[in-house]
Amino acid sequence: MDTQVLIWWLHEERRLSREAFTLISDSDQLLVSVASLYEIDFKRRDPARLRAGDRLLRAMPDDMPRALPELGMHLVSLDAATAWHAANLPMDHGDPWDRILLAQALILRVPLVSADQGLRAAAEADMKSRGVIIF
């Protein structure tokens, strides 16, 4: 799942689509990229990025590498091959974290649960990204 979906999932947000909720609920294994841990901590430690309305971001566990596995999630490491694949995705989507998450999903051959419509459009436009389900 992407970073925003992870945050929504942990806080039982109703912003998750029914399809995304069902896919996550029915999964045998919930995968979370270590890139999401970085993105969350990066955003919540930067006052310029942390808006007053980001209460869910602030409510994320302080020790995510310990907390997420305790909640039944498997952390997916970032390796050189994945970083290279993400950097070389032939798609028009500039968010480096989303590119990493998409590359990991492609390499692992798993769906990527995301509410990012720009990422969905970019993935659907790129033949190499097809097969990854983005909600």
Image (spheres, grey):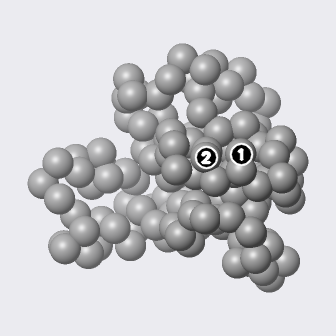
Residue 130 in the image, given as x and y percentages of width and height: 81, 46
Q: CA distance from mark 1 to mark 2?
A: 5 Å
Tell me the element at label 2: helix
Q: Residues within 10 Å of mark 2 (few under 14, many from 20)?
A: some
Packing grade of label 1 (10 A; few <14, some 14-19, many >=20) is some
User: As displayed, is residue 51 above or below residue 22?
Assistant: below
Q: Tell me what residue is drawn at x 40 percent, y 53 percent.
A: 61
Tally of numbered discs: 2
Marking on residue 121: 2
Position of residue 44 measured from the top left corner of the image (x, y, whole percent): 30, 65
Q: Is residue 5 visible?
A: yes
**On the image, numbered disc 1 is attached to which residue?**
124
User: Compared to 111, does 54 lie above or below?
Assistant: below
Closer to us: 31 or 20: 20
Residue type, numbered disc 1: Glu
Determine the secondary structure under disc 1.
Answer: helix
Give the answer, above or below, for where 114 lies relative to 49: above
* Residue occupying image coordinates x 28% and y 73%: 45
- Quarter of the image that includes the N terminus: top right
Identify the residue at horizontal 83%, vertical 41% (top origin): 131
